[in-house]
Image (cartoon, grey):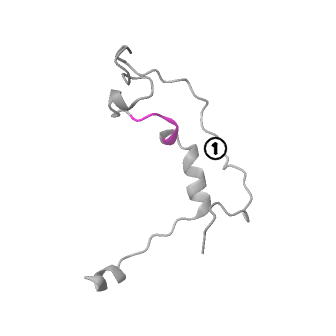
């Protein structure tokens, strides 16, 4: 079984691609299938009124240009 794990394909993503994902329209919208009791304003306390519909704020259209960032800056700190 351990041998099968060594033969698996490793997926490598480019840093620029991952940084650009935060600008996608899907990343900027709330999910549709979140239970009401998990929402911050939806029924957490016994005195709160149930939330019937979610209000979605009008957002600016996503920029077509990639975000500006320093290529040499490390995104994550690693303890060795």
Q: Secondary structure at mark 1?
A: loop
Which of the 4 quarters of the picture holds residue 79? bottom right
Residue drawn at (39%, 75%), measured in percent from left and top?
Answer: 9
Instruction: Specify the farthest residue to the left.
Output: 1
**Rendering coords of residue 55 (x, y %):** 46, 20
**Rendering coords of residue 20 (x, y %):** 59, 51
Residue drawn at (30%, 86%), measured in percent from left and top?
Answer: 3
**Quadrant location of the C terminus?**
bottom right
* Above or below 49: residue 40: below
Who is closer to the viewer here, 73 or 69? 73
**Quadrant location of the N terminus?**
bottom left
Who is closer to the viewer here, 29 or 43? 43
Q: Specify the segment rendered in magenta.
A: 27-31
Q: Which residue is mark 1?
A: 64
Who is closer to the viewer here, 23 or 6? 6
**Rendering coords of residue 36 (x, y %):** 34, 27
């Amino acid at each position: 079984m351990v041998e099968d794990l060594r033969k698996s394909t490793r997926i490598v993503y480019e840093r620029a691609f991952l940084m650009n994902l935060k600008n996608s329209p899907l990343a900027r919208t709330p999910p549709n299938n979140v239970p009401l009791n998990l929402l911050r304003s939806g029924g957490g306390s016994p005195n709160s009124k149930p939330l019937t519909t979610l209000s979605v704020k009008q957002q600016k259209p996503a920029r077509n240009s990639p975000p500006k960032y320093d290529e040499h800056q490390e995104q994550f700190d690693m303890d060795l």
